[in-house]
Structure formats: structure tokens, C-alpha cells
Image (cartoon, grey):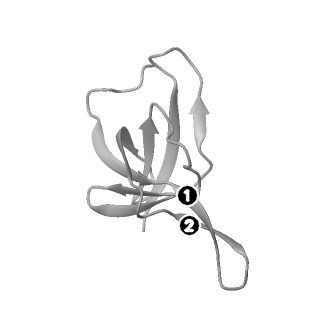
Amino acid sequence: MSLPRKNRQSAVIYPTITSTDHRGNDVKSPDMDDPIPVSATFSPQSKPNVYDMLIDTLPDGVDAYSRVEWRGDQWDIMSPLAYHVGTRQTRHWTLEIHKR
């Protein structure tokens, strides 16, 4: 099965940064000052407001603490990122996103 390339939609991913809070603890949060524009395919899941986001290449700094902006809404990454191995046409990353 190939990754659908016709119905791509624009989205923005905010990568994760680590900062230190007032107590000296390391805190991970999305870097809202450094957006990364991407083109992705979105597939709805059986749960409301949950989609799989399929992208070819995962930008640096993206993990479960990152945030996605799509269709004017903010989305959290729900599960660990999954890399699907295959040929050039089928390999991709899957991010399960949930509306904030």
C-alpha cells in the first residue's frame, strides 16, 4: 500500500524544547516560536477528534511533547511516533493526534 500523496494538507508542527522552570527542573514544551510547515495526509480514527497524521519525513525535535496546528486548531500528539518501513513509496511516520 502506498502513502496517499494526492490529498495532502498543510499543517504546522511545533517541535519540543527543553527549558528550566523556577525550581531548576527540566521541562519539555512545544516551541511556539519555531514552527515547521509540513504536508501530510490525515486519516480519521473511530474516536471523535482523533486523526492519524502521516508524513514522509519527521522533522528534528518532534516527539510526544510537540504540538500540531491543522485546520486552524491545535492538536496534541497522543501516542509514540511510529515509523513504517518500506519502499520509497510506502515508508512514512504516523503521529496520532487529538484535538486540544
N-term-proximal mark, 1 vs 2? 1
Q: Residue furthest bottom?
A: 22
Residue 99 at x, y = what percent? 41, 63
- The quadrant of the picture occupied by the N terminus is top left
User: Disc 2 on helix, strand or loop?
Assistant: strand
Q: Residues within 10 Å of mark 2 (few under 14, many from 20)?
A: some
Verify CB contact (< 8 Å) between mark 1 and mark 2: yes
Side of 88 relative to 12 (left or right) = right
Residue with the mark numbered 2? 29
Q: Residue furthest top?
A: 87
Total numbered circles: 2
Side of 35 relative to 95 (left or right) = left
- The quadrant of the picture occupied by the C terminus is bottom left
User: Disc 1 on helix, strand or loop?
Assistant: strand
Compared with 100, 58 (above or below) is above
Residue with the mark numbered 1? 16
The image's mark for residue 65 is: none
Residue 36 at x, y = what percent? 39, 48
Residue found at x 60% / y 52%: 79
Compared with 92, 67 (above or below) is below
Please identify the quarter of the rendering in which residue 34 is found.
bottom left
Q: CA distance from mark 1 to mark 2?
A: 5 Å
Q: Residues within 10 Å of mark 1 (few under 14, many from 20)?
A: many
Compared with 73, 8 (above or below) is above
Side of 86 relative to 7 (left or right) = right
Q: Amino acid at mark 1?
A: Thr
In terms of depth relative to the viewer, which is nearer, 80 or 11?
Answer: 11
Residue found at x 28% / y 41%: 9
Residue 3 at x, y = what percent? 41, 25
Q: Amino acid at mark 2?
A: Ser
Residue 40 at x, y = what percent? 36, 38
